[in-house]
Image: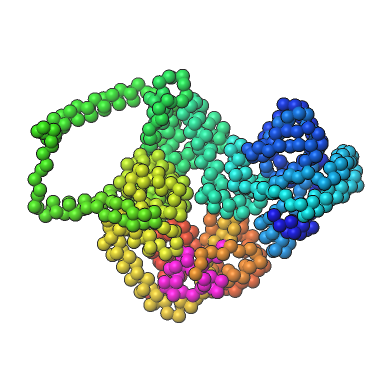
Amino acid sequence: MRISDHIVLWNHVLIRVMDVRRMMLEPGEVMRGYRVPTSAFLYVTSGSAKLHIDGIESRMQRFHVLHVGKGLSLDIAAVEQLEYFMVLYKATLPLPSRYELVNLMERENPFQLRYSLSPKYPISWLQKLEHMYQIWQAPSPLDKFKVKTLFYQLLYELVEQLHEQGVDVIRPDLVSQAIYYMEEHYQETVTLEALAETLECTSRQLLRLFKNQMNTSPIVYLIGLRVNKAKALLVNTDRTLKEISESVGYADSYYFSRIFKKQEGISPQRFKESYGGEWRRNNPFPLSKYPIVEGGLRRYSSNGYENHYHYREEGDSQMYKKSKAWMTAMVVICFTLLLSACSTGSTATPTTTSGVTPVPAASSSPSAAANKEADASRVIKHAMGETTIKGTPSRVVILTNEGTEALLAVGVKPVGAVMSWLGEPWYDHIKNDMQNVTVVGDELQPNLELIASLKPDLIIGNKVRQEKIYDQLKQIAPTVFAADLVGDWKINFKLYSETVNKKDEGEKVMAAFDKRVAEVKAKLGSKAATKVSLVRFSATQVRIYQKQTFAGVLLGQLGIARPESQEKDSFIEVLNKENIAKMDGDVLFYFVSEAKGKTDAASVVKEWMNDPLFKNLNVTKANKVIQVDEGIWNSAGGYKAANLLLDELIKYFDVK
């Protein structure tokens, strides 16, 4: 902790005392799960207690000061009679402020730190707090102002002591706090903005930290948490779908069903039927809710997006029902299969002598040689090491969007794939090719059990997205990982085509694409001097896209110019309104990242485009600001999207 930085911030923030409380707990009494609404000081005047802060235990003792930040969860258990003061305050950096101060506030933020110390003058603290508490009860604004002056006196003594002695400071782990909060409040409405406000940080900061640490976003994590809670209720209770959806935070049971299906690749009702049956088979006592032997893999529908409307009845449908007709049909099917197995088994089993099965004579026909070559083993070197693959895989699961497009380009239809970032569940430009392909989650959270149920003979993923589950995936099937997700999709394309034993097909496809690019580049002529600016708007940030992005790479291959701010061998730059000028160019193509049914990002677009700095851009004055499809220009990132992007550039530049 650099106390000099903290002094700077204390000097610049606006302080507002929110409340002054005097609290008492009897021996053995517990105050549980108190969520601190603002930054706060606690000062123990008598007694002691065990303190849990977000699950971490410490002690509260007489004449001890504890500082905590907004959003922390406190459990206080009095060991002996406990008395303490709590001063709740809010510190706000006035806006606009210098960039250095804003950056320092985000990096340090002393008002969110947790620390404790023994004041040098404990009686002075006691007297000031007693005085503050007494006058806080008075309604006069002048008295409230006096409370503020006393609070500043306490702060001076505190900062002076921190400066002289130093103290162990625990920086808040925003990710752990966010998880702790979501686990407590998953039944309530939780948004990224509200969560960030609770934890006294920006939504951008929380999203960045959460993705770095958890490899997913807070809201996606919350969805997974809610779905897991719902799965337990589906298996262990007979609640209706409406009751379950409401108990995990979804007022609309239809919307909950869609979320569940998107997450698990199966409807709640089908999950109840398939998983519930296994649970009962593994459970020797009908009244017990927990099996002694762990259940096997869940049986999922091969079509993860089947709606099963024909199962619905009026009112709140019970999630688990049995049918005599269904049971009879299953018995008939099983009996038929048994007879079939017996009859085929009697003719297909070779005779043996002394327990040795005869080996058929080798064939010298051309077809036999071809089969032998097709079954040959190949060693694929990839980001996680080496993987041996036998022959040409026929049941491939792909775990990235750009990988899906690569497989389709070489004529391989996967049995399972992660859903597209946009579309339900596939991008429009691939949905016709993806009929009956099972959705196995998304790139950030593939569903391992569903993948296993597909019995793949090859899994293709990416180290950036799925490194943490590589060991689990390779237990299911041979697994190959690309090293990175970059704008130059050709790198991964080559690996994918070799992995699925389609190297020749991949080279032909790539040669055809490169030929198109070369032809367009030759025809562009002087039009290539047009400076193309790429911008992305979302609810949380605005970015310019540089040369190493998906669209940036293709523009570079075509020799199309970029503005100086984007002519960099880098990925993106996050903008604020002060540097809107970096968006300028001869033409500005922008795309908007917006969840279905939301308008937050659209509001950001409107706000920025109405800003005087944006209106003053040359590209705005020339009316060359054009919205494009994010899937094609950015998120799909594969072979088919690259061709569609090339089509759009040909059309814009009027290449004949």
Magenta-colored stretch includes residue 633: no
Residue depicted at 62% across the width and 48% down the height = 174
Q: Is residue 626 visible?
A: no
Q: Is residue 584 visible?
A: yes
Residue 207 in the image: state x and y as whole percent: 58, 52
Residue 348 in the image: state x and y as whole percent: 13, 35
612 w.r.t. 603: above or below: below
**Quarter-of-image position of residue 261:** top left
Q: Residue furthest bottom?
A: 526
**Quarter-of-image position of residue 188:** top right
Q: Residue furthest front?
A: 165
312, 471: nearer the viewer: 471
Say which quadrant the N terminus sits in. Answer: bottom right
Residue 268 in the image: state x and y as whole percent: 45, 34
Residue depicted at 13% across the width and 33% down the height = 355
Residue 609 in the image: state x and y as whole percent: 62, 64
The boundaries of the magenta stretch are 543-568
Magenta-colored stretch includes residue 557: yes
Residue depicted at 21% across the width and 51% down the height = 375
Residue depicted at 44% across the width and 51% down the height = 467
